[in-house]
Amino acid sequence: MSDDERPPHSNKIIQFPVKILRYRLKDPKLLPIRPWLVRGLLLRRCITEIIAAGGTGKSSLGLALAIHLAAGRSFGPFEITERHRVAVLSVEEDEAEFDRRMCAVAIQYGIKQADFDDYLFKIHITDDQHVLGQAGKSGTVTATKAMSELERLLAHEQIEAFTLDPFIELWTGNENDNNQVKAVLAIFRATARRLNMACLLTHHVRKGIVTPGDIDASRGGSSSGGLVRLAFTLTNITAEMANTLGLEGDDPLRRQLVRLDRAKGNYTPNDDRIDWFRWQNVDLDNDPEGITPDHVGVLVPWNAPGLFVGVTTSQIHTVLDVIAAAAERGEAFSPSRQAKRWAGYLLMEHFEWNEEQAAKGMKVWLGSGLLVECNSRDGRKRDMKGVNVDEKKRPDGDSMSL
């Protein structure tokens, strides 16, 4: 290239949107608090996902949370300190059923219209226009006009949290395509970020058995895990967990309990507790001319029996591992409280129980079949009765509290 062909020299400095800056630690006392609406559950600019099978109660849980947020009332284990403007989009039920569910929640919790006036909104989208994300022929997912209009209205009403129920009904595409699932979730997250809102999303589970606390339980597998910052599974109580809690086989609670487990919490400490809820039938008293009134199920917080409050399944698994290992060596712990190697001493050590509590715990576990008697030998090589673990009856979950 000749000198005549070279571009003229310019002293103009081209500005690029990239910088490398020296980092200096901030004073931690001056850092802003994370913008929680509900600590551990709903955070501004983030998506919270509730993963559950149909009929488990994810919609009921979402409605109860929404009305408590609007009323500024704590909901079971979740502390709510002030009122927040909430918008609910529910497309699975018609208007009348939505009204029944909301009335049932309000009756159960004693919440009146005046408690949430001007703070609770229902998002209405015509049946044939409720799709918010749409996959084109090439598979690319884009926001629809309905999504753009929804964002405009959310901004106009200064909404602080919005619920989307259920995820699968709000977009068109392949729910088993990880890239498409991530793309539509990115649309919802972008809206939450632009408007500084929290988003609660309910999501159906994949086919097969769901392990409580499994982030990959949702349809689309692990694809949603990278986009959401908080995730929970909502599952029915299993027979094994009911036995561990000491609920007898004919106890009606065995059919009424569901458990909420943390599957992901980027901004929360490792928390291995379970939050329990039970179904409560609410009579709407809508019985003109003596017709049987409607009853609607509402999820209400439930506390596990006092014996097991504060005991985590990780602690239980630790004790069961010790019992099983000893039995495998032929040195099983004894089921007898009078024995020197009584298995109850392990419960006292790991659960910080007294002897009476340990005796009750051993009775529950032996009665449920979690612990079974086996043949073993004592320190003097004499035959004795010991206990072993029925592995099939271990409580499910790796680190969830009872």
Image (cartoon, rainbow, N blue to C red):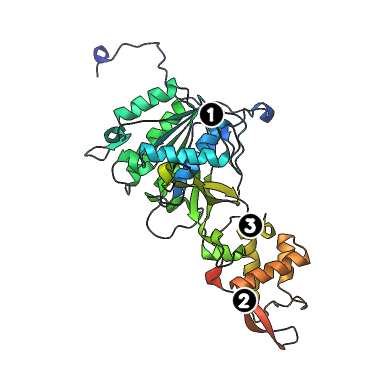
Marker disc for residue 31? none
> Identity of the amino acid at label 1?
Phe
Categorize mark 1 by other alpha carbons within 10 Å: few (<14), some (14-19), many (20+): many
- Residue 141 visible in this rendered orientation of the protein: no
Residue 31: in sight, yes or no?
Answer: yes
Identity of the residue furthest to the left in this view:
137
Q: Earlier in the sequence, mark 1 or mark 3?
A: 1
Q: Is residue 82 left or right of residue 128?
A: right
Say which amino acid is labelled 3. Answer: Thr
Q: In the displayed structure, would residue 373 be above or below residue 394? A: below
The residue positioned 38% from the left and 50% from the top of the image is 219
**Residue 80: % across, % down:** 60, 35
Q: Amino acid at mark 2?
A: Asn
**Residue at the (68%, 67%) spot, across then down:** 361
For this orientation, the residue located farthest to the bottom is 382
In depth, the one of 31 and 161 nearer the eye is 161
The residue pinned by badge 3 equals 312
Nearer the observer, disc 1 or disc 2?
A: 1
Q: Secondary structure at mark 1?
A: helix
Question: Residue 300, image x and y in percent?
Answer: 56, 47
Q: How many numbered marks are there? A: 3
Where is mark 1, residue-wise?
A: 116
Q: Compare residues 373 and 61 and report the one nearer the observer.
A: 61
Q: Residue at x 28, y 36 (%)?
A: 134
